[in-house]
Image: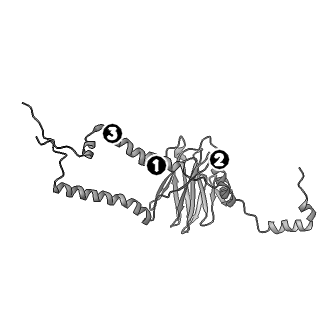
């Protein structure tokens, strides 16, 4: 005696199954199209402005930026206070430091360029740019050879912790910096 | 037994190698290839423009002083630099 099982799974769907498949499909399409819609209407989105730039060129820019706008030092790290609304530059370095402590003004928009430089080390590592705050957080990748432009408008005065969230080598845990926002 | 011919897309879903090929081709095209095109077409940063904007500011007093010096010794201002 042999048992045969009728293969019926490819028959046309019946009415109830069609209804549920249709509902699920509409739901999927709705969530899918919310991605571009949210990109347009939401206030916080991942920016898509980036450029190719050599590690050495970005290092020159960072050095010039720090020299021009440095106002003081904290633990040997330059604190830079650039003009409101300007292009500002920050880099993770090859010796696991941030290139500066940025001092910004609340309510002003800046174009923050982030990238990776050697900064006295041998290699420009891949880093992460992560702002740590109870009210706000941001999380972006820093890739050597690329300039990633973030439009930043700090809204509240205070000091915001800045850490690297991409394991970048033996000194990864040392990459604790900050951004100061003046009211 | 009621044997019906499967619809073509249903036949594909019942084909292990067809599903495997789809699983490779679709993400390769819409993720990897698209990403490579994005990277390849990224514009170059305008380094000279950035450096120009970051030039040290010339102080307000330095310009009149230089002008005054050249006014006092116009021949020095037009002299060719020695090599």
Q: Is residue A175 left or right of residue B81?
A: left
Q: In this orientation, does residue A121 appear?
A: yes
Residue A14 position in % (x across, y down): 16, 54
In the picture, residue B73 is in which quadrant? bottom right
Please give the label number shown on residue A10.
Answer: none
Mark 1 — residue?
A: B34
Mark 1–mark 3 distance (CA, rounded to whole Å):
20 Å
The numbered mark, 1 or 3, whose residue comes first in the sequence reads 3
Quick check: marks 1 and 2 in contact, CB under 8 Å? no
Q: Is residue A6 above or below residue A79?
A: above
- Outermost residue to the top: A1
Q: Position of residue B14 (x, y in %)?
A: 25, 41
Looking at the picture, how far across and down is residue A174, in whole percent?
54, 47
Which residue is under mark 2? A56
Which chain contains the residue that carries disc 2?
A
The residue identified by callout 3 is: B20
């Amino acid at each position: 005696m042999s048992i045969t099982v009728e293969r019926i799974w490819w028959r046309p769907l019946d009415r109830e199954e069609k209804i549920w498949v249709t509902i699920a499909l509409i739901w999927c399409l709705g969530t899918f199209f919310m991605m571009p819609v949210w990109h347009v209407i939401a206030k916080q989105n991942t920016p898509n402005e980036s450029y190719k730039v050599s590690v050495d060129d970005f290092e020159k820019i960072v050095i010039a930026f720090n020299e021009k706008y440095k106002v003081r030092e904290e633990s040997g790290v330059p604190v830079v206070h650039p003009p409101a609304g300007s292009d500002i530059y920050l880099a993770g370095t090859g010796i696991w430091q941030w290139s500066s402590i940025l001092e910004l003004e609340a309510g002003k928009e800046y174009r923050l360029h982030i990238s990776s430089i050697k900064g006295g080390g041998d290699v420009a590592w891949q880093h992460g740019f992560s702002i740590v705050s109870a009210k706000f957080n941001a999380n972006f990748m820093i890739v050597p050879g690329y300039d990633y432009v973030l439009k930043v408008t700090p809204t509240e005065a205070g000091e915001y912790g800045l850490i690297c969230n991409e394991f970048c080598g033996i000194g990864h845990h040392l990459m604790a910096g900050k951004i100061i926002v003046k009211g | 037994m009621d044997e019906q011919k499967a619809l073509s897309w249903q036949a594909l879903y019942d084909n292990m190698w067809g599903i495997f090929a789809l699983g490779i081709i679709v993400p390769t095209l819409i993720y990897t290839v698209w990403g490579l095109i994005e990277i390849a077409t990224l514009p170059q940063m305008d380094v000279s423009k950035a450096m120009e904007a970051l030039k040290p500011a010339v102080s307000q007093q330095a310009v009149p002083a230089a002008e005054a010096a050249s006014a006092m010794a116009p021949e020095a201002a037009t002299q060719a630099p020695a090599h």
